[in-house]
Amino acid sequence: MAEPEAPFVLSLPEPDRLHFRNLALIRPQMPSERQVELIESLGRNLTSPRLLTLIARTPHWLVHAPVLHALAGNENTPEPIRRDLEMAVSLFDLMREMERAPEGEKAERAESIKAIYQDLPPDLKPIVKQLAKQLAKSVHSTGSTLEMPPLPPAEPDWEALTLPPQGRGPAPLPYRIPKQDRATAAEATLVQEDLQRYLADEEPEVRAAALRNPALSEEMLLACLPGASRELFEEIYQEARWYFKDPVREALAEAPRCPAAMGRKMDATRDLVMLLERGGQNRRHLHRIVSLFTQMEESEYQYLTFWAKRRAPSMLRVIKVFFDRLQRRRTNQASGLSPVQSEGRWVSLEERVFMANQATQPDQMVAALRDPDPQVFAVALENPGLTARELISAIPHLDSIRAERLASSRTWSAYPSVREALLHNVHLGEDTALGLLRSLDGPPRVLLDLLRDQRVPHLSVKKAALDMLRESYEQMTIPQRIVALRGSGGELMRHLPAEVLKDEDTLRLLVADRQLDPTILLRLARNKQTPRPILELIAGHAALMAHPAVMTELLLNPKTPREASIRIWALLSDSEQKHLLRSPHLPTALRALAD
């Protein structure tokens, strides 16, 4: 089959292009068991709205319950599609609970099932009937069901088929993770997309933690500068890790949003360094040098001292004279810096190997790890001065040869942080990644980061990580499960919906905490697989009134008990009720109250 030509394909990243080709290849036929597993994995892990829309608009894939559940649980699925799928999921949950429901509630739940089914879009009703047939539950008074949906045409309009629908009705405002949790994640995450988001965070503590992250590379930092805030410029300038790097200083000074005072003092230092490198050619040059020295800011003397120790040691006395004349106290930050190799000079392989073996400074270590010759990399790994921090900062840039070489190192592969960082390297082989994954023995956060990283190219690795996460959760005690759910901000519910949402004992204790993170409450209120008793507990939670988004999600969840929904509806203002009435997913019983 020839590759389908569609303009939007060129806008997709390379991994998503490969996924689109696979989906387009298997779409015209009935999927095998392995193909259903592939589609389920893609529906759970993809972030591209185009590809998720394509899966959602293929009826003979949705009749497989795992695919439907995966799309409904993926937060990147376009909002209108996801909410429709969630309604179908809630309908099946209510059908399963009918057997265990008390006699007094069965009639109410039967009415809820009928109302939810009537609110489903027409294209979902045949799929729901087919899945209901598998459950041996009728969803209509006749009990009739449809057969398997027909296969799609061989040459569809890919552009129209993958175009996400426009949003229908209001969408609740998303919650932000608490500041302290964001700061902790910013300092430890290995996902580059998350790191870029933390660098743009409005809280200075979160940005500072992201700047300390060893996985933050110079290239990533430079890419964030065009849209960075003025506060981030100051924080980068005050961070010693970036303050002395010439490319970072140049990018800071040339960025459009750079504060004027910072740009002026760095420009003055740059002009002074250029004049000092050329030497005092005449009296005019000497007057200019003296003038620039008198304009020097105290913070720039650290960089100027660092430059002089590398390029012009004879100027150190002159710098000290001017520093003392201006009655500024002497800095000691630059005293620990040692000369590094001058930029722009060709260095032989022998010299680079020698430097890799003898280097003691972090910048020299990182340069040796990124050297184009694998011999230099191998020697740098044996350097006793190399630490895991420098190694982790270089891992995202390693090619396949170096990544495999590092993975086979008995010394460094024993470090859990190095193994974790290697798993996020896009060039690591599938077999090697699976081997490293089996050796991981860390908190659930490690596996969650791997599942969230869209750069990981191997679906088998993500599937194995999901299996390990499921096994780890099942072996936890209830207190340990509560700690894991809190630590992940409730994200465990997305990847393990069956295990987490069916564990009512854990959820009851979790929701009973009056200081619970509202993000977890929102996830529980939004999920259509959350048990009805838990939704009722959330409706009485102390944090409910302070967070309208939780109230909105409870009202849009068709599984919320009717009494709780009516009580919450009465607490809303007229404008909030009108806002919710515009949503097609508002249950019929609440819509009738407004009438």
Image: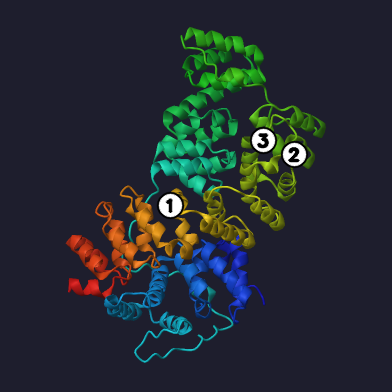
- Mark 3 vs mark 1, foreground winner is 1
Report the Cα–Cα distance between label 1 and label 2: 43 Å
The residue at the point 48 percent across, 12 percent down is: 329
The residue at the point 75 percent across, 39 percent down is: 377
Q: Quadrant of residue 435?
A: bottom right
Report the Cα–Cα distance between label 3 and label 2: 10 Å
Residue in the foreground of this view, choosing between 444 and 433: 444
Q: Which mark is residue 324?
A: none
Which of marks 2 and 3 precedes in the sequence? 3
Left or right: 544, with 55 as reference point = left
Query: Relative to 269, is 195 above or below?
Result: below
Query: Relative to 59, is 462 above or below?
Result: above
Q: Residues within 10 Å of mark 3 (few under 14, many from 20)?
A: many
Tell me the quadrant of the picture where the C terminus can be found: bottom left
Left or right: 115, with 486 as reference point = left
Left or right: 407, with 575 as reference point = right
Is mark 3 in CB contact (under 8 Å) with mark 1? no
Q: Which mark is residue 366?
A: 3
Which of marks 2 and 1 precedes in the sequence? 2
Amino acid under disc 2: Phe
Q: Label 1, on which residue?
A: 482
Residue 391: x and y, percent? 65, 38
